[in-house]
Amino acid sequence: MTHTFFSLELAYWQQTLIKLLAGVAFILALTGAVVYLYLFKFVSFMQSRLGPMEAGPYGSLQLLAEVGKWLQKEDIHTENSDRLIFGLAPAVVMGSTFLMFVVIPAGPNAVIADLPSGIYYVLAMSSISVIGILMAGWASANKYALLGGLRAAGQLIAYELPLVLAGLGVVIQAGSLNLQSIVASQSSGEIFGIPAIGNPFIITQIVGFVVFMIAVQAELTQTPFDMPIAESELVAGYQVEYTGIRFLVYFIAEFATAVGFAAVASTLFLGGWALPESWGISDDAMHVIGPIVIAIKAVLLVGVVFWVRFSFPRFREDQLQRLAWKFLIPITLINLVVTAVLKVVL
Amino acid sequence: MTAITDRQKLQYIAAKAADARVNVELETEGMILNIGPQHPATHGTLRIVAKLDGEQVILAEPMAGYMHRGYEKLTEVRTYAQITTLVNRIDWLGSFANEVPFILAAEQLMGVEAPPRATWIRTLLFEMSRLANIILFLGDMGVQLGAITPVFFAFRDREYVLDQIEAVTGGRFHPNFDRIGGLKDDLPKGWLADTKGVMDKVRTFCDQIEDLLLGSEVFQQRTRGIGVIPADVATQYGLSGANARASGIDWDLRRDNCIGLSYPQLDWKVWTHPDGDSFARFWVRLQEVREATKMVDQLCDGVPSGPIMAKVPRIIKVPAGEAYISTENPLGEMGYYIVSKGDLTPFRVKIRSASFNNVSITPWLLRGVYVPDIITILASLYFILGDIDR
Amino acid sequence: MAPKPKMPGVLKGLGVTFRTAMDTMFPDGPLHPPSPSKGAATVQYPREKETPSPRARGVISLEEDNCTACMLCARECPDWCIYIEAHKTLAPPRRAGGKPRQVNALDRFDIDYSLCMYCGICVEVCPFEALFWSPEYEYSEVRIQDLLHDKERLGQWMETVPDFEAYESGSESKVKKVPR
Amino acid sequence: MTDETTTDAPAPEETVERDERREALLARFTDALGDGVVESEIQPGLDLWIRVSTDAWLTAAEVARHRLGARYFGFLSVLDWLPSPFGRSMDSEVDRRLATAAGEPPATPNATIEHGVAGGETRLQAFARVARVGEPGDYWGVTLKADIPDDTASIESWVSVYAGADWHEREAWEMFGVTFVGHPGLRHMYLPGEFEGHPMRKDFPLLARQVKPWPGIVDVEPMPVDDEPAADGAGDEAAGASEAEATS
């Protein structure tokens, strides 16, 4: 179906190309903003210091400076490392990050591919990064990296389950896997007849939301779950041997995944790009406001992730496994049962 | 302060037994992991050779010696004034506290008595260097466990204490301010009032650390029941300071054997904890910092007037004899055994440093712990490399 | 034993970091505009500089005409980093018609700051008050040989030596004077 | 002051200051060890030294720990009583050449061994400090000494009584060459594996000062042309200071 886009006749592949480029630009811009806002500024204020102030006004070009620094760094392969896998690992991790954004909607039709099984696809894509991390840990022929990689494997797989189960609660309540319909059902619903703020699933699925955020914290290997990159033990975990552009890819992947998960969380629990219908904002206005709304919600959620990251020590790996299997999964299962029963009853 | 329940202990042993069984079936052969000498968790250059079975430590052996400067050999060719500069580089965080026992031992040999004002200010600076040392530990324990923010709070508030020490002695880290018979100089005008202001800042810091670390469940998960040292083993290895008090040993040299300092005239409390685990060591040190701020407040109020230096000849020849004086340094008991033969330079100085004994327990303590617990236990023992290697 | 996250402990930690962030961003209360540079505890070094305390041991300065080349500082220095060479000359007599005095004139007085450990024994042991501490600290060099300050350089530091400050009440030591 | 004060006749000081606590302690040691206690010294109100015979060294530890309750292990090390052959205050080779050039008599090292408190016969002596901790108000510490025979240079190891002595004995073995019989594994504590020699022995030179002339010795040259007797040496007024060569 040809689609008129500013009255331009565009073939299907041209549309997807534009959407892809717009998507990548949107992700990188959002990631850059998040890194500057939180990793450089908000964290420094939490530690009563100013953060980078030299590059650009108030250190705004610091990320540019760091990217430039990493690009011109030498790309070192350790002596007996497995060159091919060592080189490919960052690509796999980066791939899983960008594949996640394919299905996240940022406007009525601003989604790269509106798959019917939207949320199932997103959670599947996010678990590919485990393979990348394992490849990095094994291939860099370094004891610390091996330990880091194995810890990451154990942790990420353990926290896939709560992530999926928490998302499932939303699916039951929205009645569909497709992200657009989840967004629609949140903006059109109302709570006890008051349509003022629509029906964001964060209210009814509060347990799911908290477990989802904890699982996201673990998926991003952030403190208190940053055993794979435990600075005080494994120095830099599986990233120990990476320098130059490969380390840059890891850096971008890490923060892009943070933005990705935050966008998914805001779509599932905070109503995604839509504002409640009762506010009566016309549909074509949403084409423009949509991306801004989801950007704000994602940035806020990433803020929570960083706030938690810089306030807690880290769990030992057997403790975080116990937390996942014995605590988070039972809670999400109970949540599912309750949601299902309520869904049927109401 | 709930002691570790027996159920927790049984659970810990059961978990260990289960892991051991699994390993036996898998016959996974161990891996030697070198932690250090360049490693963020060791305060300086300590290398730990750990034989691992999976994530569990079978045997961990610290290798010291990367920072060995041969102090005891050097002191045999240095005059007493030069040794004072050498000696405050052993425990470089609480550096004034190193000079005090050495000078007290020399004064005991010479039969010289420092005037009351000098003794009082010596105690005041002793407690200030304790603050400078242990505040950094409170922050550092957090960073060893992964929380990055406490260490920034620690460095921020420790700067105020160091500024006060610099205002008096001229050196932030290496004051070189203690002399046989008294102190090199007197307090500058307005110093006491500023110090009381700094003490309030340190108290707010303690409250922040208590909320941020001590209260957080993640911290308690990582430290309760980890690295338990029973009182008997602690005394056998000669653990001293907060490490001993955390295992329930009610012993503090400032109260039990106070020579040449003015602690008996202050009212303060010795804090102990029954558990003997990493959490207890952190908790005892946190209370000790609060206690030190109260002591400094009392010290600031009652400074006696009088001379700062007793009558001492310019070229000091300590009469022949032997003396051993040890004081309650921030890291533990630090003592100097001076043997003098009436020369300009001592004949032999045995430096008993706290961290040497505190770390000598690690081979016994680190058997069968997980890799992250090595870092927790080492952080909670709180040693300084210069103290181990001398 | 599943870890029961008792909320208060965990949330109190978050509260502390958030409050610190707010204190840094809005040092003088939420109503006023945010000014983090005032709230932060750090100093932007090249532009703003912290003044060290007057007693800080930054660099040693030499009052040349007080020095009689008695070598005491060179002997007492633990690091052996003071090099002195002097020769004897006849100085004019104090009182008219008196015998010319025999005095040591300094040829060379170098302190090697790459070896010096700033212990202050030389300043303390000098019987003629020729050496003084100055809190200056910005004299780092590209080449390590330039850290060997000669007589003129040490003389230049003399103006940066602050006057000795008064003592706390109750002290009996008298305030020394810096020969200007 | 190496006066031999034995317990029954305290040294005839004017004020006979008696330190009952330490004397009671000493009495318990002597009746526990019998003739093991060779010599002892009490500094009233300050400290207590006890020298035991070489073979009573381990039993002294057991007595101190189990019988007298001194559960706290302070430290253990070795004293080398040989005066340093490098002169009284270790002036380096270079200085000695300059000193002889400048006409000063070279310092003659006296080779006689004088022991410190509580005497001794041999050159090397093991000394350790244990203390009783944990009971507020009843803290005491004692320094135990024992001679190490010159020929075998070995003594019993305390590891069986105080596990903490392990590292101390490894350091003493490495620094003084004293082998501790019964020690689980005497190996280097600080020095690299292939280091030979025992650095803390007095006859081991401190090389740091051999290579650099001591700036204090570089003196003021005499007046180029004059007849007065040039003030010798450093030409400084405190004769004591120059002779004392407050050294390296």
Image (cartoon, coloured by chain):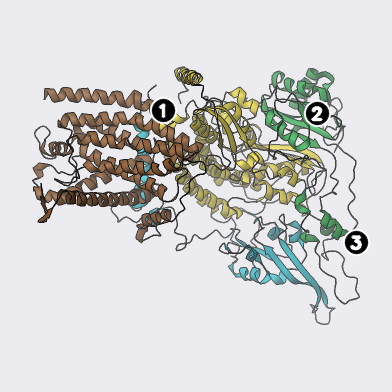
B330 lies left or right of D33: left
The colour one sees for chain A in the rendered image is: brown
**Residue B308 at x, y = what percent?**
67, 51
* Residue occupied by mark 2: D154
The colour one sees for chain B in the rendered image is: yellow
Residue A253 image-quadrant placement: top left
* Residue occupied by mark 3: D103
The chain painted cyan is C
The disc labelled 2 sits on which kind of residue? Ser
Residue A156 image-quadrant placement: top left
The disc labelled 1 sits on which kind of residue? Gln
The chain painted green is D
Which residue sits at x=9%, y=56%?
A: A7
Residues at marks 1 and 3, common chain?
no
Secondary element at image label 2:
strand
Secondary element at image label 1:
helix
